[in-house]
Image (spheres, grey):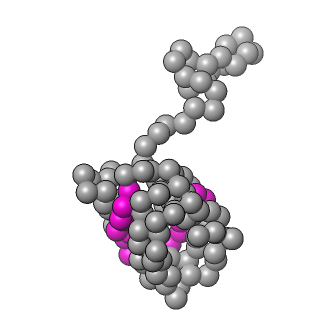
Amino acid sequence: MERWEGGEEEEEEGEEEGEEEEGPAYPIDEGGHALVPNGVIALEGGAFYECSTLTSITLPDSLTAIGDEAFNGCDYLTAVTLPDSLASISERAFGGCSALTSLTLPDSLTSGGGCRL
């Protein structure tokens, strides 16, 4: 956390500039499965970035957007079925998912955002 004192920016003790909170946006069970709860409409960028324990995921029917690099670097993610409500996938959402062998795209998808698989 940054704070301002006397016109100068200072960093809180124990934090480094550019430091971000680590870990997936939603819990992953012992079997490597994540469940994004119903009602979530957007999966933020980097939600599961480089999450080495993620192998499968259930996405809600309410989901309309997947952010930049949401699953980038998830080396053990093998298959994803995207919900019929999904309208857009941002850039590199599934980049570096080397084990991904199946990605089911819905007819509702209107924007791919240049994502690379």
Q: Measured from the top left, where is residue 116 in percent x and y?
A: 63, 69
Residue 88, compared with residue 32, is above or below; it is below
When asked about the image quadrant of residue 38, the answer is bottom left
Q: Residue furthest right?
A: 7
Q: Quadrant of the C terminus?
A: bottom right
Residue 7, compared with residue 116, is above or below; it is above
In this rendered view, identify the residue nearer to me: 29 or 9.
Answer: 29
Look at the image and give the residue range highlighted in magenta: 54-69
Residue 15, compared with residue 73, is above or below; it is above
Confirm whether residue 36 shows in the render.
no
Q: Measured from the top left, where is residue 85 in percent x and y?
A: 46, 79
When asked about the image quadrant of residue 84, the answer is bottom left
> Which residue does the image show at 59% across and 62% down from the upper left?
95
The number of callouts visible is 0
Q: Main secondary structure of the magenta part?
A: loop
In this rendered view, identify the residue nearer to me: 51 or 27.
Answer: 51
Q: Measured from the top left, where is residue 76 in percent x and y?
A: 41, 59
> Which residue does the image show at 33% across and 51% down from the upper left?
27
Q: Residue furthest front?
A: 99
Q: Residue furthest top?
A: 6
Q: Residue furthest bottom?
A: 107
> Which residue does the image show at 38% across and 75% down from the upper left?
61
Q: Is residue 63 magenta?
A: yes
Confirm whether residue 35 shows in the render.
yes
> Which residue does the image show at 53% across and 55% down from the upper left?
73
Q: Quadrant of the N terminus?
A: top right
Residue 107, compared with residue 56, is above or below; it is below
Horizontally, residue 101 falls left or right of residue 4, namely: left
Q: Is residue 100 magenta?
A: no
Horizontally, residue 24 falls left or right of residue 93, namely: left
